[in-house]
Image: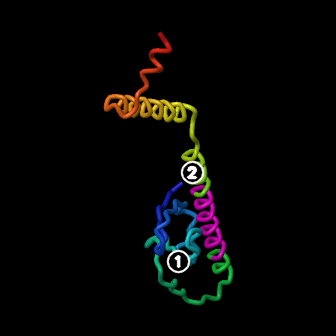
Amino acid sequence: MNSMHIYCPFCGTPYDIDASALPHNDVKTKCRVCSNVFVLNKNTGAAKEEPVLGEKSGRGNAAAEGDDAAQSATAEINAAVAKDEAVAAKNNREKRKINSLQIITFLILIILFLIAVIEALMHFHIIDLSFLLKNLS
């Protein structure tokens, strides 16, 4: 597969598409992220301006082949966008997960902080917890 890296000229969303699926003329395509329509060309990449209309020829079959290629390129971009969206959704789910090690570490830090605060309060005689030590003996 001859991969081609293009970016939406409006929002910069990256796409990896198969360059062999693109026709030699301009193809209008729609960005899945910002919904803007842009022109895709095999040689020049993506651009905001409208495609240059080719000469009208008597061969309707060539126009149909161009339409098929345009649909194929659009389908390729849509597949790439769907793949990128699935990867992004998976990464977001993994980022939101909190594992048990994180919870235990957080609880230990809270306990250590409370011990340090109590020690500081006792050192400066703000609180007196010596009665606890007398009862333990």
Q: Which mark is residue 81?
A: none
**Disc number at residue 92?**
2
61 or 66: nearer the eye? 66
Percent of width and height locating residue 75: 64, 66
Chain part drawn in magenta? 67-84
Amino acid at dot 2: Asn
| 74 part of magenta stretch | yes
- How are the colours assigned in the image? rainbow
Q: Name the residue at the top extreme.
A: 137
Residue kind at label 1, given as amino acid type: Phe
The answer to whether residue 79 is above or below residue 121 is below
In this rendering, would 6 be left or right of 22?
Answer: left
Q: Position of residue 121 (x, y in %)?
A: 37, 33
Viewer-nearest of discs 1 and 2? 2
User: Which comes sooner in the sequence, label 1 or label 2?
Assistant: 1
Image point (55%, 89%), residue name: 55
Residue ID at (42%, 21%): 130
Label 2 SS:
helix
- Using the image, tell me which numbered label, if any, was put on residue 38: 1
- Type of secondary structure dominating the magenta stretch: helix
Q: Residue furthest left?
A: 124
What percent of the width, then of the height, locates residue 94? 57, 44
Camera-side residue: 60 or 74? 74
Residue displayed at 64% across by 88% down:
58
Of 109 and 41, the residue lying toward us: 109
User: Is 54 situated above or below 44?
Assistant: below
Q: Is residue 108 left or right of residue 60?
A: left
Depth check: give the residue in front, 82 or 98. Answer: 98
Task: Identify the secondary structure beneath mark 1.
Answer: strand
